Image: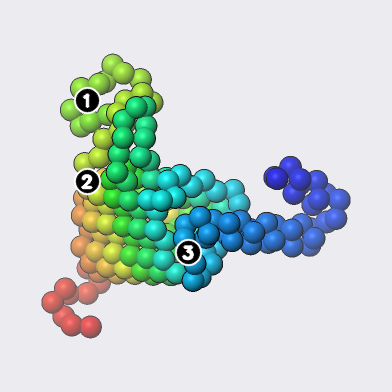
Amino acid sequence: MMYLFKILSNLFGYNVSIKINSLRNYLLSISLSSKLNMEKELARFQYPIKIQGFKNIKIGKNFTSGKNFRIQAIDKYNGFTYSPHINIGDNVVINPNCQIVAIDNISIGNNVLIASNVFISDHSHGDKFFKDIETPPALRKLDSKGSISIAENVWVGQNVSILSNVSIGRNAIIGANSVVTKDIPEYAIAAGIPAKVIKILKINNVSE
C-alpha cells in the first residue's frame, strides 16, 4: 500500500497524493472503528498503525491518533498468558509516533492530549529482582509492577515515558522528555528524569 501511494504521488503530483492519503486514512478509520466496536462514532486513525488485542481495547468517542501509532494489549508472550486492558476515554488526541502497551491495565481519561513520541507501558522484560538476568531480554517473562492511570484533561509533552504502577491526576501537565515513575497529583506540572512536581496549578481543596 505504501509503495502504491508513492508511485501515485510521483505520477499525479502532491495535491492528488494528499487526496489519496486522506481516502486511505478514512478507509482505515472505518475498518478499525468497526473492529474496535465503535459503532456510534468514527475514530480518526492514520496509516501506518499497529493494533494488537482488539478485544481488550476500548476507545471512546472522538478519538484521534497520528501516524505510527502502536497500541498493544498483549495476552500472550513467549508461552506466558496475561489479562490486559486498555481503556481510552472521549476526545483523546494522540500525536504521531506514540506507543501504548499493556499486559495489566492502562486507563486514559477524557480530553487527554498526548504529544509525539510518547511511550506508555505497564511492564518490562523480566522482574524487578533480575532473577532471569542471564536470559536474553526478548525471551524473559513480561512483568508488571502495577497499572497506569491517566486522569482527565492531562497534557503529556513530547518524548515522555510513563512506566508501570503510576497514577497521573486530572489537569496535570507532564513536561517534555520526562520519565514518569511515580504518582503525579492533580493540577501539577511535573518534569525531569525521574519526573518530579515543580509546581501546583491549583490547590486541591478549592472548589472549581
Q: Amino acid at mark 3?
A: Met
176 left or right, relative to 6: left
* Quadrant (top left/top right/bottom left/bottom right) for the N terminus: top right
The answer to whether any part of residue 97 appears in the image is no
In this figure, which residue is indicated by the disc labeled 2?
A: 146
Q: Secondary structure at mark 2?
A: loop
Name the residue at the top extreme. 134
The answer to whether any part of residue 38 appears in the image is yes
In this figure, which residue is indicated by the disc labeled 1?
A: 130
**Colour scheme of the picture:** rainbow
* Residue 54, placed above or below residue 133: below
Q: Are marks 3 and 1 in contact (CB under 8 Å)?
A: no
The earlier-in-sequence mark between 2 and 1 is 1
* Residue 144, placed above or below residue 91: above
Q: Secondary structure at mark 1?
A: loop
Camera-side residue of 158 and 108: 108
Q: Residue at x 36, y 23 (%)?
A: 139
Q: Are marks 3 and 2 in contact (CB under 8 Å)?
A: no
Q: Amino acid at mark 2?
A: Gly
Q: Residue at x 23, y 30 (%)?
A: 127
Q: Amino acid at mark 1?
A: Phe
Which of the two marks, 3 or 1, is nearer to us in this view?
A: 3
Q: Examine the image and state in which quarter residue 206 appears.
A: bottom left
Q: Secondary structure at mark 3?
A: loop
Crowd tier of the residue under label 1, counting other residues whose Cα lies within 10 Å: few below 14, some 14–19, many 20 or above = few
Q: Position of residue 53 (x, y in %)?
A: 42, 46
* Residue 33, placed above or below residue 148: below
Q: CA distance from mark 3 to mark 2?
A: 28 Å
Name the residue at the left extreme. 205
Q: Residue at x 42, y 61 (%)?
A: 59
In this figure, which residue is indicated by the disc labeled 3?
A: 38
16 left or right, relative to 108: right
